[in-house]
Image (cartoon, helix red, strand yellow):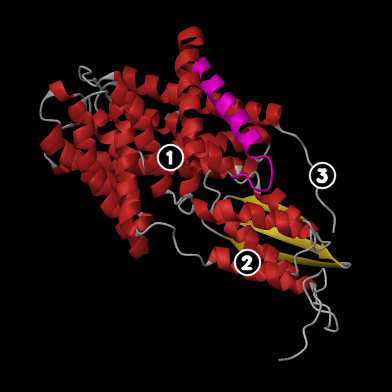
Amino acid sequence: MGEGRAVRPDGGTEGAAPEEVSPERVTALLARLAGMLLAASGEGASEVEQTVAQAAAGFGARTSMVLVPDGATLTVVLDGRTSTVAVRAFPDVARLDKVAALKPWAHRVSLGRTPLAEAERRLAAIDGSPAPYPWWLKGLGIVLFSVGFAPLMQPTWYEIGSTAVLGLVTAVLAVAAERWPRLSRVLPLVASAAVSVLVLMVFARTPAHGGAVLLMLPALFYFVPGDLLSAAAVELAAGFLTTGAVRLVYAVFLLLQLYLGVMLGVYATGGDTSAMFDVAAHADLPRWATFLSWVVFTVGTVLSFAVPWRLLPVLLGTVYLTVAVQSGATKLVGEVGGTFLAAAALGALATVVARGPGRPPRMLLALPGFFTLTVGSLGMRGLTSLAGGHPVQGFHDLLSMVTTVVAIAVGLLLGSVLAHRPQPLPHS
C-alpha cells in the first residue's frame, strides 16, 4: 500500500498541485445553477439573483443578472476577467426536492471552502437526481391535492366523490405529459375539456349537486395558475417589472386555456353555456372532515410537487396557520382583509422558518399556504359565469380575483419584509 497524504483545507492533498479555479469553469457552474433555479422558479424569481451571487462569492467572483421568467443574462467577474452567458429554462414547480437541495449547496459553496470540482460534482448530482416519488405516487398526489381542495368549493360528500374520479383523469393526463412532452404544451386545455365533458355528462345532471363549475374546479386546481398570478403580483410589487409582467401574461394565457377547454366540453356534449351556473349545493360535510381535508391537501402537495417527505409536518403548520388566520380575520375585517392578513402571516412565518442554511427555502415553505388562498379559481369562475350568461356574477368574480391577487401579493411582501433579517454575502 502507498503512503497516505495529508489533506489540505481546500480539498486537495499535500504535494499535489492546487486546483485550478478558472473563470470559465466558475461561469459554467454558475450558469448551470442559474438554469436550475429558473427551472424551479414557478413561484417567482426574486431569489435567483441572490442565490447565484451567494455561490459566486465562494470563489471570489461577482455576478449581475438580468432576469425574465424563462431566461437570464448572467455576467461573472473573476480575476479581472468578465464573462457573460445566456441561460434559458422554463419555470415550473414540479421538482421542489431540487429547490430544497440547492439551498444548503449554495451555502456550503459560499463559505469558500468547497473545491470547485466538488461543487461541480454535487451540483451535477442534484441536477441529475431522479424524482423522489415514482410516477404512480405523483398521480396519487394529484388526486389527493384535488380531493383535499374540494370542500373549499362545496362542503359536500358528492363534491369529494366526484372530485376523486375527475382528479384521477387529470392525474393520468399529467403523468402522461411527462412522457410525451408535446401533450404538456396543451395539457391545461386537454384536461379541462376532459373534465368538462365528464362533469356535464355524468356528475352535473341535477342542480341538487351544485353548479357544474364548482364540480370542475377541484380537479382542475392542479392546473389553475393562481400561484402564478400571485407570484407575478409579488414580483411587480417588489420591482421585478419585466419578470412580473411576463409571468402575469403567461398566467392569464393558462387561465384562458382552461376556460377554452371547459367551453369545448360544453359544445362537445351538445349543451349550452347556461349550464355554467355557479350555485353551491346544500352542505352535508361534517366539520371534522373539512378540517382533515387540509391534511389530505398537504400530503397531495408533497407528492405532486416532489417535496421531501420530512417537510410534511412544517408544511401542515403553514397550511393550518394560513387557514386559521384567513378564517378568523375574515370575520373581523372581511374577505379581502382576511386574505391580506393571512398572506402576511404566511410570508412572515416562511421567512422566519427559512432562516439558516439547513432550513427549507422560503418559497417551498410558503407554497401550500399559497394554494389555500385560491385566487386562480375566482378567475375560472368569472370567465365561465360570463360565458354562461351571468355577467354580473362573472364580473364580480373577476374583480374579486384582481383584488385578491393584490391582497396576497402585498401581504406576502409585507410579511417577508417585516421578518427579513439582512445578511451580508460571505467572502472567500
Secondary structure at numbered mark 2: helix
- Residue at point 46%, 41% (across, down): 312
Rendered view: 263 above or below 118: above
The span picked out in magenta is 337-360
Depth check, front residue: 368 or 263: 368
Q: Which mark is residue 344?
A: none
Residue 90 drawn at (x, y percent): 51, 56
Q: Name the residue under label 3.
A: 424
The answer to whether marks 3 and 1 mark residues whose Cβ atoms lie closer than 8 Å is: no
Q: State whether the magenta stretch is mostly helix, strand or loop.
A: helix
- The residue mark sitting in front, 3 or 1, is 3
Question: What amino acid is found at the position of numbered circle 3 in the picture?
Answer: Pro
Secondary structure at numbered mark 3: loop
Dividing the picture into quarters, in which one does residue 260 lie? Answer: top left
Depth check, front residue: 88 or 245: 88
Question: What amino acid is found at the position of numbered circle 2 in the picture?
Answer: Arg
Question: What amino acid is found at the position of numbered circle 1 in the picture?
Answer: Pro
Q: Is residue 108 magenta?
A: no
Residue 379 drawn at (x, y percent): 39, 30
**Residue sitting farthest toward the bottom:** 1
Q: Residues within 10 Å of mark 3 (few under 14, many from 20)?
A: few
The quadrant of the picture occupied by the C terminus is bottom right
Residue 243 drawn at (x, y percent): 61, 45
- The residue mark sitting in front, 3 or 2, is 2
